[in-house]
Image (cartoon, coloured by chain):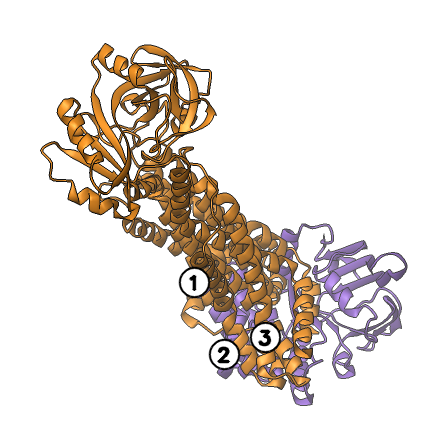
Amino acid sequence: MNVSSAVVRARGLVRTHGRGPGRVRAVDEVDLEVPQGQTLAVMGPSGCGKSTLLHLLGGLERPTGGEVWMDGRRIDTLSERALARMRRRSVGFVFQAFHLVEELTAAENVELPALLAGRSRRQARRRASLLLERVGLADRARHLPSRLSGGQRQRVAVARALVNDPLVVFADEPTGNLDTAATLDVLRIFEDLRAAGQTLVIVTHDERVAATADRLISMRDGMFVDDTRLAGTGTGTGTGTGTGTGTGWLGGLGGLIGLEG
Amino acid sequence: MGSVVLVVRLVLADLRRHKAQAAMLLLAVTVATATMALGLSLRGVSDALYEQTRAATAGPDVVALSGDTGPAVTAALASLADAPEVIAHHGPYRIVYATLSTRDSISSPVVVQGFAETPGAVNRPLVTSGRWVRSGGTVLERGFATALGVGVGDHVTIAGRSYPVVGIAVTAATSIYPWAAQVGPGGGPSDYSGLAWMTRADARTLASSKDLPVTSALDLKLRDPAAADAFRHAHRASDIRINFHSWQFTAVQDMVILGDSQPILVVGSWLLGFLAITGVAALAAGRAVEQTRRAGLLKAVGAAPGLIAAVLLTEYLALALAGDALGLVIARLTVPAIASPTASRIGDAPGPGGATVATATVLAVAVAVLSTLRPTLRAMRTATVTALSATAHQPRHRPWLTALSALLPTPLLLGLRLTARRPGRAVLQACSTATTVIALVALLTINAQPERGYGLDGSFALPNLRGEHDRRLMLAVTVLLVALAVVNTITFTWTTAMEARANMAVARTLGATPGQISAGLSAAQLLPSLPGAVLGVPLGVGLLSLFAARNAAEAPSASLLGAVLATLVATAALTALPARLAARRPVARILSAEAA
C-alpha cells in the first residue's frame, strides 16, 4: 500500500487502563493503516479493545504509547483544542447509542457540527436538508429524536457525521441497537458511502455490517489477530491495503452541496 | 419504630454520600437564621442592657431638664421633688457644656454633671474602673472614654483645665454615648457629646471660669415607675420650660444607634434565606432523578407514600433544623457586640427570645420545604416502574431559541442552548445575581451617606459610631450574601455541566473545543445573570427607599454600574473553574457511561 494514501495510521498503539496488578492493555501494540476510501470493519468479542481503538484513532482518547496519524498529521501529541479542530474538519462519529441532542430536531442535530465548524446558519441548514434527504428522512427533519425510531435516529446520526465532509467516519457498533429492517437501512447507507469513496472505520459485532467492508480486522485482547481483505485482495496480518473508488453517492453529493470551497 | 429506624438509616446513608451538598444546606440555613435571629434580637438585648444598667445605677424614672439655670429654675425643679408621685430624687444639679481634649489632641463636646462625692439614692453612676469623683478629678462615662481611648490615670483637658481621669462609670440617667447631653444650652438642640462627672464645686468653678453654658437637671424616682409618662404630662404646665425624659424614653433612645441595624439584618436574612432556597432548590433538582429512583425502590419494597416523603424530606429538614440551631447559637454569641456598639451599658445580653427562635425556625423549615417539596412530590406521585426507570429531565424543544443561537458564535450558541434546557434554573441564577446586586447597591448607598463625626465640629477624630456600625453590619451581610451567591453560582454551573455532560461530550466529538464547551457553560450562567444584575439595581434602590430617610443620598451611578459589571465579571470568573473541569472530562468515558 502507498503510505501517503493512508488517511488513518497507527504505529505501536497502546492503551492501558488501571494501575498495578489490575492494569489492562485495552489496545496492545497495534499497527494500522487505513487508506483513503477504504471501509474497514473491526470485529471481536466484547472487551477486546475495539471501541478503545476507535476512540484512539478519532482522537477521543489519548494513547498510553505509540502514534496516531490522521491525513499525514500526527494527532496523539495535539492539544485538546487542536484535536477538536481536527475532529471538526476530518472526522465524523456514529455511535451505537446515537447520542443525538434530545431537545433538537433531526435537522437541528445535523446542522450542529456545521455551526460548530463556523458555517453560516443558511449553509448549515442547506447541508442538513440535503443529507437528511439522502438518508431518507427529509419528511422527518422537524421531528425530535424522541419521535423517531431507532433506525431513523441512527440515520440522523449518520447524516450528522457527514455534515462537515469528513475524511473518515468512525462508527462504533452502529447497528447494535437496531432491528433487522433498520440495520438494513443503515447498511444501505454505508454501502453508498463506500461506493462514494468515503473512508469508514466500523467497529461491529454484526457480520452483516462486516460483510459490507473492504477489509476486516479481528481483535482479541487488544491485539489484531486477523486482517482480511474482503474485496478479493487476499488475507494478511498487520498493515492492510486497498483503495476505494472516488465516484458515487457522496462524490455527487459534494458537488450538489458545494460546501468544499 | 422500625420505620423511624429505616428513615434514620436512609437519611444517614444519603448524608454520607452527599457531604458537600449537606454542608451547603447547613451553611446557607445557618447564616440566614443567624442573621435573622440577630436582627430580631436587637431590641430585646438593647432593652435588657438598659434595664440592667438602670438596676445597677439606681436609674431615675424621670429626668427633668431645664435649659436655664438660676434660682427660679432651681425652685421649679425642686418643687417637682415634692410631688406626691415622687419617692426620691437627686439634684437639682448643674450640667456644664464644654470641650474636652485628650493628650492625643482628640477634641469632643462634653457635658459635665456636678455630682456629690457620695452618690445619693437616685442616679448613682456605677464605677467600672477607678473611683468616683473627688475634688480636682473627673470621671468619664464609659462609652465616651472608650471612644476617646482614655483610661483611669490619663489626663484630659476640659475647657482649658487639665483634670486627671479618676474613674470610668456608667449611668442609666442619660442616653448612651454620644447623646449624653439630652438637651442643648438654653434647651435647644445638642451636639454629639460625651459625659463627664465632677464634684459640684469643680463643676461650678468650671462653668464660671470660662462663662460656659449651664443647664439644670433633676432625677426623680417615682412610686410607680410605669407612670413616668403620666407624671410628665401632669407636670408639663409650668412657667419654666422643663423637658422630661422618662426611663422608657431613654430606653428607646438607646435603639437610635441601632436604627438601621435591624432592617439591615432582617432584610439581609430574607435575602440570605432566598439565596439558600435558590441554591438548595438547584441541588435538589439536580438530584431529582436519583431521588425518584430511590422512591421507586422504596415503593417496590412496599413503602407507603408517607414513608417516602419522610425519607426524602427528613434529610433536608434535619439539616435545616441543625443549621437553625447553629444559627441561633451564633446569634447568641455575637449579639452583645452588635446590640451594644458603645460601652455605655453593662450587663449580660439575653439569648434570642421565643418569638425569635420560632421565626428563625420557620425560616429554616421554609428553606428546606420550599426547595425540596417539588422533587419530593414528584417522587411520591411517580408510578413505581416509571420511578425505577426515571431518566434525566428531558428539556423542551425551543425552536426560536435554537434558531437564534445558530446565528451566534459557538460559546454563545452552546450557552444559550444550555440556558434554554433549564429555564427554571436560569431564573434562579438571575434571582441569585439580582440578590447580590441588591446587597451591593445597599452597601454602596450606605457608604455614600454624608455624616458628621463625633469629634468637635463634626470632626472624624471621633468616628461616627452609628455610621461605622451600620457599614460594618452591611458589609458583613453583603459578604454572607456574596458567599452564598458564589456557592450558588458554582453549584448552578456544576449541576448544568453534569446534566448536559452527554450533550457536551457529543459536541466535543463534533468538533467543539474544551475552551468552547467551557465558555458555553460559563455563558449559560452569564446570560441569565445579565438581566439579574441589571434588575438588581432598581430593586436595591426600591428596597432601600422603604427604610432610608427622605433626604438619604443615593450611591453614584458610576459605582452602581461598577457593581453590575463587577458582579458579571465575578460570575464569569466563578463559572470558569467548574466549567473548565467539566469541559475536560474524558469524552469517550462520558459517552460510554451514557450508553450503558
Are both tags, 2 and 3, on one chain?
Answer: no
In this rendering, is residue B6 above or below B193?
below
Instruction: Kindly indicate the quadrant of the structure image that contains residue B457.
Output: top left
Q: Which chain is purple?
A: A
Q: Secondary structure at mark 1?
A: helix
Which residue is identified by label 1?
B427
Residue on which the image places disc 3: B310
Label 2 neighbour load within 10 Å: few <14, some 14-19, many 20+: many
Q: Badge 1, how many Cα within 10 Å: few under 14, some, many 20+?
A: some
Q: Label 2 vs label 3: CA separation?
A: 46 Å
Q: Hey, what amino acid is under mark 1?
A: Val
Q: Judging from the image, what secondary structure is the residue with disc 3 in?
A: helix
Task: State the image coordinates of residue A42 (x, y, percent, origin top left).
Answer: 79, 72
Q: Nearer the viewer, residue B433 or A79?
A: B433
Q: Provide residue A184's location: percent of width, then percent of height.
A: 68, 86
Query: Residue B157: horizontal and vertical position, in percent?
Result: 35, 13
Q: Are marks 3 and 1 in contact (CB under 8 Å)?
A: no
